[in-house]
Image (tube, helix red, strand yellow):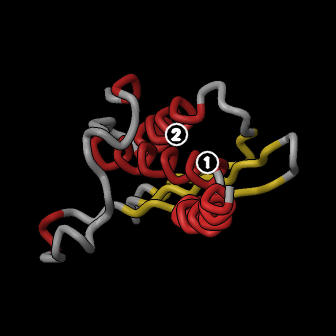
Amino acid sequence: MARIKSDVRRVGPLLALLALPLAAVTIYGGTTRANGDPPLQQIADEAAIAGVHALASSDHQTAAGRAAASSVAARRVIGDRPAKILAVTPADEELKVSIDLLDPATNAQATATARYVPPSTGLAPQKAAAVSNHASPPAHRF
């Protein structure tokens, strides 16, 4: 009987030691998720990148046509997600697109601006705009 009591006393601290890594992972995961971009900001970022990609790769002859292609690409990324588009502002001469979104449920707003930096400027690829073929759905490509 005395042996059983001594084993029971050891189980409590042992369980506490086993629970520490789980608690640490839970706390780390919670703080990492809290510090990440909110979903609305991610949507705005993706839409701006798709818009600037379409603006830079558009073969329309007029600035209005390139701006329209950029706006359509940004709107396609947003699609049916829970975001209201306040403004899509393409700047053809600067190769820049700004997106303003509103989440109707929380009234949260997000703004994103993407600027295309052509490879000929000599900037390292890490410093150039993150514009690739995988930045948005293929539906926006003209």
The disc labelled 1 sits on which kind of residue?
Val
Q: In this view of the protein, can residue 63 be seen by the observer?
A: yes
Q: Residues within 10 Å of mark 1 (few under 14, many from 20)?
A: many
Left or right: 134, with 95 as reference point? left
Q: Which mark is residue 74?
A: 2
> Tags 2 and 1 in contact by the CB under 8 Å rule?
yes
To which residue does mark 1 refer?
A: 88
The disc labelled 2 sits on which kind of residue?
Ala
The disc, 2 or 1, on the residue closer to the chain's N-terminal end is: 2
Q: Which residue of the protein is positioned furthest toward the front in this rendering?
A: 1
Q: Nearer the viewer, residue 13 or 105?
A: 13
Which quadrant is the N terminus positioned in?
A: bottom right
Q: In this view of the protein, can residue 31 be seen by the observer?
A: no
Q: Residue at x 12, y 68 (%)?
A: 120
Q: Which mark is residue 77?
A: none
Q: Is residue 33 above or below residue 17?
A: above
Q: Residue at x 26, y 47 (%)?
A: 132
Dividing the picture into quadrants, the one containing residue 133 is top left
Question: Secondary structure beneath disc 2?
Answer: helix
Question: Secondary structure beneath disc 1?
Answer: strand
Q: How many numbered markers are drawn? A: 2
Camera-near label (2 vs 1) is 2
Q: Residue at x 23, y 70 (%)?
A: 126
Left or right: 79, with 91 as reference point? right
Left or right: 86, with 111 as reference point? right
Q: Position of residue 14 (x, y in %)?
A: 56, 64
